[in-house]
Image (cartoon, grey):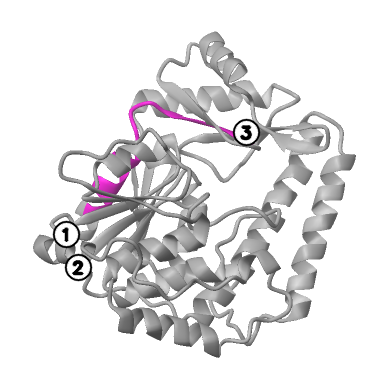
Amino acid sequence: MLPESLTVASITQQTWDAAQAELGEAWRSLHASRAGIARQVPFERVLIAERRCTDILHAWFSDALQLEFVDAPRLVLSLDVDGVLEDDREGFSSTSIAGAAALRLLGLGGVAVLLNTARSLQEVISRVERFKLLGGVAAFGASVWDGVYGREYYLLSDAGAAQIDRLRAILRRDPGSLLDASYACSLRTSRMMDGRLRPIVGDEARKVLDRGGLSDLTFWVAPRHTDFVDRSVDKARGIDRLVLELGLRRLPLAAMGDAGCDVPMLKAADFAFLPAATLPSYVRTRRQRLMRSRHLGGQALWEAACQLVPSTSLQRQVIDRLQELRLPDWIPESLRTPPPLTRGLFPRLATALATRR
């Protein structure tokens, strides 16, 4: 992890080039490794190198957009990370200038953004600190980070925790399995196939659980990994515990996600936001306002931010700040597209929010 003092001025082309070079070398080392325990070391090197690239970008965006803590929130947004706040088009996960701008607008409008993700607690803490957020939920709701007081809460059942440990021991004996060591309250595993990281597919993942008698666990399959998690946890329980610890339970709750694991937190929210072409079968609850974006990723998050903070003056303030910035050449092209200045598709949302205060 990079030092907290890292700023726009201290990040140079050389900083970025060194991080990219290390990522490339880590991948070459992984490709050259033999299957088995020897492959675990270069795999972990790849993960560390990817996270360094992520943190450099997030540090630059955070400092450039002047992200700040929300002192007196009026609303809470439970925000998914992968596919919403961030994507991995560059070979590692990162938000974009549009995503960072959305965080700035939400902060200016008094919206407390709480991350709610499948990622590890370590990665959640890194993002909470970098983006000046109040906290986050990790591992599908299995752990919670109160960023205000620096406290961790574990929501795993005893049976679930024991079975995750048993599964970890089982997969360590499998020469094809690669385990992400940063995950404690869930288990994330990948395999190398045709030179790429791949997941354990559904049928095989189910067989792994059945053979081990691990009935308290379930799994989620992503493009390059599979997450195994305690059945008793979900993102709704996680966000409920976090807002309780932060003293924010009386505030209206909004949520934004794009996958099946996000449905519990979406159902628990007063306002639900979905990026384009995601969860097409989702049906809003009786008193919920549902907004489907025309965009994906950071652009969709900006559109959601404009609904939650409908002030055109605050939107213009963020856009003006973006126009003042000179993006360095090293920032990847896919992360440079600014958001449009728009009131969005749902102008009546401002009235709805006012009635909930």
Marks 2, 3: nearer the viewer: 2
> What residue is disc 3 on?
189
Q: Position of residue 265 (x, y in %)?
A: 31, 43
Q: Quadrant of residue 95?
A: bottom right
Q: Are marks 2 and 1 in contact (CB under 8 Å)?
A: yes
Depth check: give the residue in front, 102 or 278. Answer: 278
Residue type highlighted by circle 3: Thr
Residue visible at 83% across and 37% down in the picture: 195
2 or 3: tag closer to the N-terminus: 2
Rendered image: mark on residue 251 = 1
Classify mark 2: helix, strand or loop: loop
Depth check: give the residue in front, 321 or 217. Answer: 321
* Label 1, residues with CA under 10 Å away: few <14, some 14-19, many ≥20: some
Task: Using the numbered discs, state the Cα–Cα distance from disc 2 to disc 3 in whole angstroms.
Answer: 39 Å
> What residue is disc 2 on?
74
Q: Are marks 2 and 3 in contact (CB under 8 Å)?
A: no
2 or 1: tag closer to the N-terminus: 2
Residue range highlighted in magenta? 225-243
From this view, report whether residue 182 is shown above or below residue 15: above
Q: Point out the residue furthest to the right here.
A: 32
Looking at the rendered image, the quarter that the C terminus falls into is bottom left
Q: Quadrant of residue 7?
A: bottom right
